[in-house]
Amino acid sequence: MTTSLAPAGPPVTVAGQLGAPEAAARAARLETLLGDPHDPANPHGIAALAEADSRRTPPAATEELLAGARLGAEFVPAGDGGRLTRADLLAQVLRPVFRRDVALGFGYGITSLFAAAPVWAEGGPEQRAELAAVLLGGGRASIVHHELAHANGILRDEFTAEPEPAGYRLGGSKDVILNAARSGAYVVYARTAPARGPRSHSVFLLGTDAIADARAAGRLTHLPRVPMNGMRGGLFSGLRFEDFPLPGNALVGAEGQGVALALRTFQVNRCLIPSLAVAAADTVLHSAVRAVTEGRTAPLARRWHKPLAGVFADLLAADSMATVSLRALGLLPEHVNVLAAAVKYVVPDMIREDLEELAGVLGGHGYVRGDAQYGALDKLVRDLPVAGLGHAGTAACQAVIVPQLRTLAERSWFRMPEPPPGLFGGGAQLPALDYRQLGIAGGDDFLAATLVGAADRLGGARSFGGQMAALAELADGFVGELRELRTRCAALPAGRATQAGPGVAVLADRYALVLAAASVLGIWEAQDGSDAFLADPAWAVLALTRIGSRLGIAVPDLPEGCLAQVLDELIRRHLAGRSYDLDGTELIR
């Protein structure tokens, strides 16, 4: 059986300030406005942001700069007066912020999009207009999560909204909410049914007027700021609502739709966070290269070749996976659910491992807190777990993948057609992100089809020898891993796959790494030659070798010159002030 993978409709052509060139221009403008991150005198640089962090206060001057640049417009769909079209373009615009400070990116910005997502998916015209006005005016929106299993501080506790004839009564307390004390809107996932189940929660929008009314009536209390073990800066505090009446029109979508809305809209969050984490790690890699090259005329010491080139290859692999998932949100919105969950925990885990390697390169430099040249490592080590919601985030992603494994094995792997080529080609005109089209049904895997197709096309390359032969061998190795996964996953119990025991999580982990490998092959094959380095197989060979080593599958020895090619590009980009992602963006320095 073969299932069609058609795009989500005709491509949306965006005009004015909303297309790819304009997004690149806005990203470049932010780079310029934020200035050299390594300049100790820069009020928006790493040192200044770290100083604000140590005081547990948001960086007021930098937030004012972002407000002046109308960053909030990036989180509002174009149809509602904002600039949001494609998710990959949004990530491109936000990367300058995250290169400097993950906490800044969360504190001023991206969590407003996470909060707004249910309104963009199911909100009525008045709700959309109300929330758009807050964000376009420079305000923020806070997401008030419902309680999840494996809950940490952010995901612990929840609100209840008891139905009554005129609407609902909101009550409850939650200690850890990002921007609770300074948001102009709350999007609340509240329990509306006492029993556990898929219809236990609903979503409510509380705008500026509703918040003011609750405070004036003594129904809303702001709880003290909460110090977090990771991301700091005075961003987290709590809320308590006491028997606050909500009108019926505060309900977003239908009653009982909260869980379904979370499953649909969290896909965007799960794709965006890894892409922005790549930007943050980019700064650390530049710091590491600076530490071992600055002021030296001798060639780079051999002991640094493998870790630096390897981390560079990992960032390209992580960016490949994140970029594919972001593009798929618009192109194949009904088929992204499993991929979004996979990218959300593969990429942060990969970056955590990379930071450990870079710590070895930086040595004592890496843990000088607030240092303008090298302080990015220490800050990202602390911020990354909070950005990814820690173990709770990983568990939630595994909970999406695990129930789909048997279905994927039986109906999708080695059966699905390959996705449209625009998924991998950087210059393709893609449909805009439409939250209303996002699906949560599993069972389709377009990246597995990409892996199989790429391996078939590389079949004749073994006779070429060198890097092409290694690439073909690696592709075959990952196809072999997919076949093994098909056998093991098809044998899982029908119904609740979690009945197979904790070992099923290992299958999910292995499958997610196979998707990472497929993304690398898809991005490499789509190169048009305009970037000679990305068109060459060296980076893909090194990236796939490292992914294969994480899986424990047999990988070929690196061909002669492969590591040197990647290392040469690493040094070239550092000297030219270009980013270590797929775009190779020109940076301010």
Image: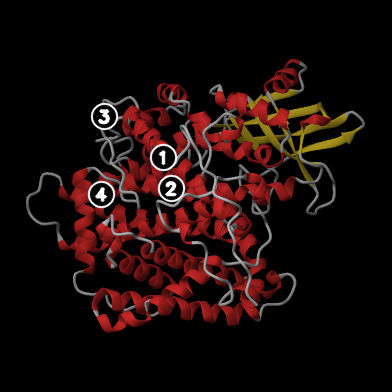
Name the one closer to the observer, 79 or 73. Answer: 79
Q: Which residue is mark 4?
A: 288
- Residue 540 at x, y = what percent? 33, 66
Location of the C terminus by quadrant is top left
**Which is more N-terminal, label 1 or label 4?**
1
Labels 4 and 1 touching (C-beta < 8 A): no
Q: How far separated are the C-alphas under marks 1 and 2?
A: 7 Å
Q: Is residue 577 left or right of residue 20?
A: left
- Relative to 469, does residue 207 appear above or below in the rendering? above
Of the residues shown, which amino acid type is indicated by label 3?
A: Pro
Q: How far separated are the C-alphas under marks 2 and 4?
A: 17 Å
- Residue 430 at x, y = what percent? 50, 50
Q: Which residue is mark 2?
A: 277
Of the residues shown, which amino acid type is indicated by label 4?
A: Ala
Residue that appears at 59% across and 82% down: 487
Q: Which residue is mark 3?
A: 40
Labels 1 and 2 touching (C-beta < 8 A): yes
